[in-house]
Amino acid sequence: MLGVAPPPMEAAAQSAQRSPVFVRSGTSVADAEPPPVPRIALPSRPPSSPGATGQPAAASSLAPPAEQFQRTRRVLGAHPALWMLLAPGLLAVTAIALLRATAVHHGSKLLQTAAASANAVQPSAAPAPAENSAEQLARLKARPPESLTARELTLLAEAQTEEARAAGKALRAKIEANPALGKDPVLQRELLRLADDASTSNDALSAMAVLDAPTAADLLYEVWTHTPVRTDATDLARALVYSTDVRPKASPALAVALDLRLAERCEQYKTILPKALKDGDRRSTHLLLKLSGKHGCGPKKRDDCYACLREQPDELTATINAVKSRRPPEFGAP
């Protein structure tokens, strides 16, 4: 190693790294880097069989979790576009499955809650069979109203309404089958009572309309005029008494009252006065009395609205006295 000059040193920043230099006896030669070997495609190696490695098949198929994770990572890294496309779809499918499972769970809980509530309310909402029995209703009727609960009073009122409706329909069917029954004072009184009840008035008025003359029109007129309060029953009774099949059943006395109620002009009243003088009864008295007034018409309401009746001053007075002397029919009298 004597007589050999050391190799020149180059700056580290300007020269590339080289392989170490070995000095042999007698001479020194720097080992140069071997030329790069070109890459060539190697033939794919067939998978080794379990027998070749000497390991059993079951042991080779069971890779550690870390090795499986690395293998999956290498596959996804080699195909980035594939997992980028599949990931949103997998996430959407997973979210939909979770939402459906949550909805089914909550729906089943709601159904169970509703069923439990219905079972809890059903016994109190639906009356017991004993409460609908005739014996139970009879006991409720026998008790003082102040000793009943609100529910018992409601049940009793509903039961009485149903009984009244059933009685009204039965009586109507009975009279329609035999209209001559209307001559019975007891039946007439029952019809008037049912006509005063809103739940049975329609059946009662319909039954009155089919009675024989003159009872049909007389009863309907009684319902119409016996009270100053206007109701559905009074409106229906008025319409029925003027209907084409009931109006001809009116007696001469009632016909006068019906004509007086429809008259509007003085000439119409003057035509009715002879009929009222002959046939009218007390039901026409107040209708004639209003004709005695000599004011109410004209611009200042001071003119006589019925001036044509003053041509014979005694005619109106005589008619009023005549109708006062005749009594109307009294229904339900013994």
Image: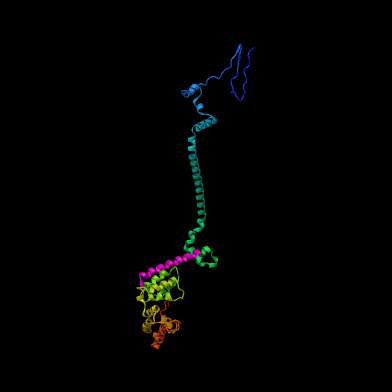
Residue 56 placement (x, y as % from top left): 50, 24
Secondary structure mainly formed by the magenta segment: helix
User: Considering depth in this image, is 37 or 56 the residue closer to the camera?
Assistant: 37
User: Considering depth in this image, is 196 or 28 the residue closer to the camera?
Assistant: 28
For the point 50% across and 58% down, the residue is 125
User: Considering depth in this image, is 314 or 206 the residue closer to the camera?
Assistant: 314
Magenta-span inclusion, residue 172: yes
For the point 42% across and 72% down, the residue is 235
Q: Quadrant of residue 188?
A: bottom left
Q: What is the quadrant of the N terminus in the image?
A: top right
Residue 281 higher or lower than 155, as above or below: below
Residue at the outermost right position: 2
Magenta-span inclusion, residue 85: no
Residue 308 placement (x, y as % from top left): 39, 85
Q: What is the quadrant of the C terminus in the image?
A: bottom left
Residue 325 placement (x, y as % from top left): 41, 84
Residue segment shown in magenta: 154-179
Residue 172 shows up from this direction: yes
For the point 50% across and 67% down, the residue is 141
Residue 30 placement (x, y as % from top left): 58, 17
